[in-house]
Amino acid sequence: MPTHKTVKRKTSDPQLPTRFSMVRSFQLADFVTLGNGVCGCLSLMFAMKALLTQNTDFLFSSFWCIPAGVVFDVLDGRVARWRRSTSLLGQELDSLADFCSFGLAPAVLGFACGFQKMLDLVVLTYFVCCGLARLARFNATVASLPTDQHGKVKYFEGTPIPTTLVIVGVLAYGVYCGKFWRFANPMFQHEGPFASFSQAFTPEYVWGGEISVFPGYELHPLVLMYGVSGTLMISRRLRIPKLLCAAKHIADGVEGIEGHIPRQREISRYMQHQVQANNFTNNESLQRIRAHRAEDVRKGFQHAWRAYKKYAFGADEINPLTLEPLTTRNGWGATLVDALDTIHIMGLHDEFEEAAEKVRQIDFEKNDGEPSKVFETNIRYIGGLISAFELSGNRMFLKQATSLADIMLEAFDTSTGIPWQMWDVQTGTGSSEAGPSTLNNLAEVGSYQLEFFRLSQLTHDPSYHKAAQRVFDVLLDSNEPRKGTPYSVPGLYPVFLDIKTGKFVNGKPNLGGGSDSFYEYLIKTWALSGFRLQRNLDLWLESLRSIKKYILSRGSDQRLYMAVGDDEGLDSISDTFTCFFPGTLALASRLLNDNETLGIAHDLLMSSYNTFSRMPTHLGPENFGFLPEGDSDSDLLESQRAEIKKYGFYLDHPYYLMRPEVIESIFYFYRITGDERYADWIWQIWQGIKVNCAVDGGYAGLRDVRIGRRGGLIGKQESFVFSETFKYIYLAFATPDVISLDDYIFSTEGHPFKRSTSFNGTF
């Protein structure tokens, strides 16, 4: 069976990228970089033309191409910052262009000027190899070099490759003064382009002459300047201050939407903001209660895990009612991977080692034959593997995460860089969940930042981070808020967009399914980056202003709800997905030391928890609606009016699928405030889950939260039950230093990533 790397694609496939898609995806800075490469190529060709014709005009043309390349080399970074856009190929293009212009071309010029003895060739080859090694080392180690307050490296290890311009200057001066070519002397006469060619490079006409190293092997001493230059390039002891050469390849997103790059004092101020409370009650009685509750949750997890291991180990899911293994996420073992960090956190060492061995056997280049949902693959598999690596230190997890991410990166190979919604790893083709279209939604194009940023840090490969940030480049460049269009309010983004154009098409802005994690990752990726990704913060603050103005609405019960809408109006409906927002907003308020926003987050938490606490099962519905304060209820059904009177809201879809969002937000408030009532709320929900959802195969969904098991169960237990629901419940009763919010950032799938991993603005 073909892998994703070897598959042959039919040219008639309608889902192939459009013609010239690679060139069309180039940014202006990339074309400037290509100008550098063109200068290098022309220099090589002019040097060869000079050898053929013995015409110094071509030689001087070759010389002039090198400083021209330096101009392009300086301009490409400036253009990228001016345009606030880069492509996935930017760093690679720059390195290859530099090698051509400042590595190969100077060496060929040396050969053309007479350094043609065997030992000369050895020195020239050494010089070229040093230049190649220098560029490779820079790309691999720049992320580890110290930076200034702007995120730029303070020095380079070894001389940068463009310093070979000095050698070119020496050669040009020598040719101008007749120190190299015999026919540079106007008195030299020859007939035809090759007359007396063998006498053109006699020792007396190579500046500095030649010496005999040993019989039969001569050397031109001047060629040693190439050897010195190459040695200086690869030196790790030689440090060139940034004043002599500006740092390149600052990570995408470090520069804000107004061009601001955070200074170290700003970053230091944010680092002083404590997220997690330090006033947890620690009397002996309460500690015993917490320990008992944590153990009870742990046993509940083990009950579900034993059933999965017995009947479906390695499958994506288990049907908790029929005990059948289910393939829902390509057959790679979604529950297996998603649960890894929860197993580790709970201290289930034997289960963790057994699961790790199973993960080692996964081959991500083979699947069940169905396309992968790229977003879900990222948050469940890649995120789960990265977190397992960070918690355990087992590099097998990182290797598997990188292997899968490399496959999923192919889904970003579109004309805009916005990923396909679905990706077939067998055929290497993309599609939309809705069929033959190029639609995707906001959450599924904008929720790669956290995982891809951390993967770039761990691998020192910027391509993952670049791919995730490229989505923002396109969305910002392709859409301007304009009244009367789908995108009418700055920072409130419609749900659906076309990946071919990058333009929003429809779907009223909201914080629920299809949008939720896009906003979540703005603030969380900023925090994970050590507060350096300024653009993320700028976009978060812009969105938050509009959310407060257009999305939040008081209900007839005086509670604050999250609705759907923009400046054209508001729909008073919501879903359980929106209930992540109070917790994320609370986290943001502590990161930014914003108590006013914390108050808003608390009001939203109260309405979210109310959808659970008012139900006799202590479990909440999938979808619900409310009556905005001051609005008439004449458009509502009688049953809806009755439920609003009874509960403060009405149930639209009354089923519960063990979703974690309400529990997640309560957990954040517990860890941020230290208030034990929030832990008690989570305990009540856990009791509701045990009473209403527990079955032999784990925990099933509930068809109607108003009547509990009498209304029937749903044979569904998604992997997030293990990665999120159980994790947040358990952590509410574990000691607060376990996965502290000051030490970790949770992904949208509940995977904790370490905040201590350093980032200096580059990879």
Image (spheres, rainbow, N blue to C red):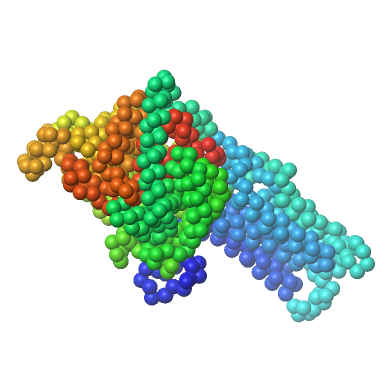
Classify residue 7 as left or right of residue 247: left
Classify residue 226 as left or right of residue 546: right
Q: Residue at x 82, y 71 (%)?
A: 200
- Residue 526, percent across and down? 44, 39
410 over 490 or under it: above or below: below
- Residue 315, percent across and down? 40, 57
> Closest to the observer: 287 or 262?
287
Classify residue 106 as left or right of residue 32: right
374 over 387 or under it: above or below: below
Q: How many marks?
A: 0
519 over 470 or under it: above or below: above
Q: Residue at x 76, y 59 (%)?
A: 126
- Residue 492, percent across and down? 29, 44
Q: Residue furthest top?
A: 283
Q: Residue furthest right?
A: 215
> Closest to the observer: 381 or 635?
381
- Residue 213, percent across and down? 90, 62
Q: Quadrant of residue 649?
A: top left
Q: Is residue 23 visible?
A: no
Q: Quadrant of residue 671?
A: top left
299 over 323 or under it: above or below: above
Q: Residue at x 71, y 60 (%)?
A: 128
> Closest to the observer: 708 or 663?
708
Q: Is residue 361 visible?
A: yes
Q: Residue at x 43, y 42 (%)?
A: 342
